[in-house]
Image (tube, helix red, strand yellow):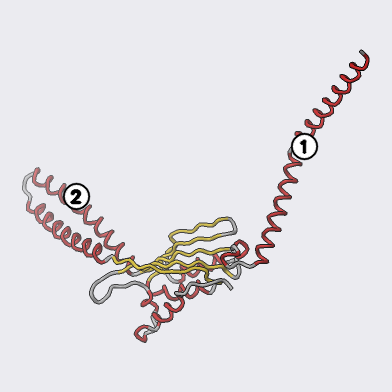
Amino acid sequence: MLKKNNISLFFLVLLTACDGGGGSSSAYSPRTESNGSKQVLSAYLEIVPHRWEGTADSVEKWTFKRRGQLLRKEKTEERLLTYSIRIPTAHAGEFIQEVRTLGEIINEHTSLTDITREYADIEARLKAKEEAVARLKELLRQARTASEILEAEKALQQALSERDELRSQYETGKALSESIQIDLTLRNRLYVEYSQGGSYWNQLLRSIKSGWEGFVYFTFAIAYLWWLWLITGLLILTLRWIARRSKKNAAGN
């Protein structure tokens, strides 16, 4: 049995799923507290699946089923799969429970980041920029000369651009506080080291497989370089023939 961390996300999911008696898993994920604070929760899980085949399909199916977003996916041959996934708060608990059914957990932890100050700063700047846009629109409406209109339009376009950027940052912060980022690592059981809890027999089979593959590659290399061995043989025969002729000539003298 692979070792597990003392702090289990499974118990966190159970506890938060029962929060308030509503059975909602949203309590597991970061949310806006009653005092207005906003926090971003991220989780990391490292799992050795019971079955390697089909694991990627399951993860991606559950991601879309829970209305999540697949931020990153990387595969290292048949050894390793890594994901970065963002799941809405309302579905994070269910998603983590599904992922945990894949196999044995060898590492897991969570981290919490408070973004209250940054979020409040962006919110205040956005409000001020909205007021500035309103004032500039009024100035443009009251403009009479061509130069006044041109100047007001230029200032308004700049203010609108800055407002849209702040809106984007505001929405990003809101989305982060209403979802959880899950970094998931899946390791093929055949390549889990013994020190990490891997099976002795898996290590033995892997060694045998590696040895056989090395032998096959060596054989192919020998067959592919047939011309080199032919030239080497001819060179050796030529040198031996020259050596014998030299000995005969020396004996004749």
- Give the residue at the far bottom of this rendering: 21
Image: 217 above or below 131: above
10 Å crowding of disc 1: few (<14), some (14-19), many (20+):
few
Which sits in the foreground, 32 or 161?
32
Q: In the figure, is residue 78 to the left or right of 38?
A: right
Image: 244 above or below 3: above
Secondary structure, mark 1, is helix
Q: Which residue is mark 1?
A: 226
When asked about the image quadrant of residue 13, the answer is bottom left
Q: In x, y percent, where is residue 47?
A: 53, 68
Identify the residue at image location x=20%, y=54%. Answer: 160
Q: In x, y percent, where is residue 50?
A: 60, 70
Q: Which residue is mark 2?
A: 158
| For discs 2 and 1, the disc positioned in front in the rendered view | 1
Identify the residue at image location x=11%, y=47%. Answer: 149
Residue type at mark 2?
Answer: Gln
Q: CA distance from mark 2 to mark 1?
A: 72 Å
Q: In x, y percent, where is residue 24?
A: 38, 80
In the rendered structure, find residue 133 and report the number of the disc placed on it.
none
Earlier in the chain: of badge 2 and badge 1, it is 2
State the quadrant of the C terminus. top right
10 Å crowding of disc 2: few (<14), some (14-19), many (20+):
few
Q: In x, y percent, where is residue 60?
A: 50, 66
